[in-house]
Amino acid sequence: MQESSPNKSRPRLATVWLGGCSGCHMSFLDLDEAIIDLLQEVDLVYGPLVDTKEYPEQVDICLVEGAVTNLDNLKLIRQIRRSTRLVLSFGDCALTGNVTSMRNRIPVEDLLTAVYHEASSPIGAEAVEAVPALLPRVLPVHQVVRVDAVLPGCPPDVDRIAATLSALLDGQTVKLEPRMRTFG
């Protein structure tokens, strides 16, 4: 569903994967045939499932998976906020930092030394030059930009994703049942 020309009658949907495991996107794919119905309602304009290199302008809804971990994430989430009407924190890492923030107890230089300089794996010190500069602390999305809705879960289950997208596409406030508001 690559962007070909803007279609103002259909909402423009993006999904983004920041620092995390991709579990939220895997759960998104678990919508199965409901994805076909969804794609008849929206234009999927950006995300791991779309071959678009730059985040587009005038996005209506963006599901943001993962925490803000490095300078590339920071630049992208700021671009997303500027270009998107509704930003949704998608999953526990986006909401709280979750597993990704476990590194917050370790100074960045100590982390890079342990992983790249002293590790016995094939990863070497040259890899440090290739990875984006890490932020001193992993941050949940709302600590960097304004968030319009949240979807907890690690990962959020299919019912939560469907209920949230349905509400947002109908222009409604997201009101999840209590069982859908839990973390983990």
Image: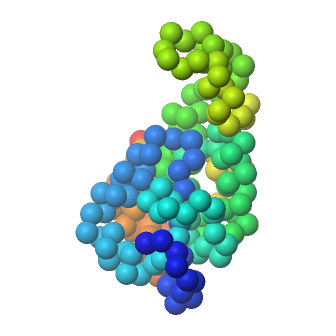
Which image quadrant is residue 108 in?
top right
- Side (left or right) of 26 relative to 107: left
Q: Nearer the viewer, residue 34 or 116?
A: 116
Whether residue 113 is visible to the viewer of this picture, yes or no, is: yes
Q: Is residue 184 above or below residue 151?
A: above
Q: Quadrant of residue 53?
A: bottom right
Question: Residue pushed farthest bottom?
Answer: 9
Give above or below for 160 relative to 120. below
Q: Compared with residue 33, is residue 178 higher up or lower down, i.e. above or below?
A: above
| 71 sits left or right of 37 in the view | right
Which residue, as the protein is rendered here, is positioned at the far left? 33
Q: Residue at x 69, y 29 (%)?
A: 129
Left-right relation of 162 to 70? left
Percent position of residue 102, x then y: 57, 28
Tell me the quadrant of the picture where the C terminus can be found: top left
Q: Say which of 148 and 82 sits in front.
A: 82
Q: Position of residue 122 (x, y in %)?
A: 50, 17
Q: Residue at x 68, y 54 (%)?
A: 76
Compared with 114, 72 (above or below) is below
Q: Residue at x 39, y 68 (%)?
A: 163
Quadrant for residue 81, please give it. Answer: bottom right
Going 44% across and 60% down the picture, which residue do you hit? 49
Residue 126 spot, x, y in % from top left: 65, 22
Percent x, y of residue 51? 50, 62
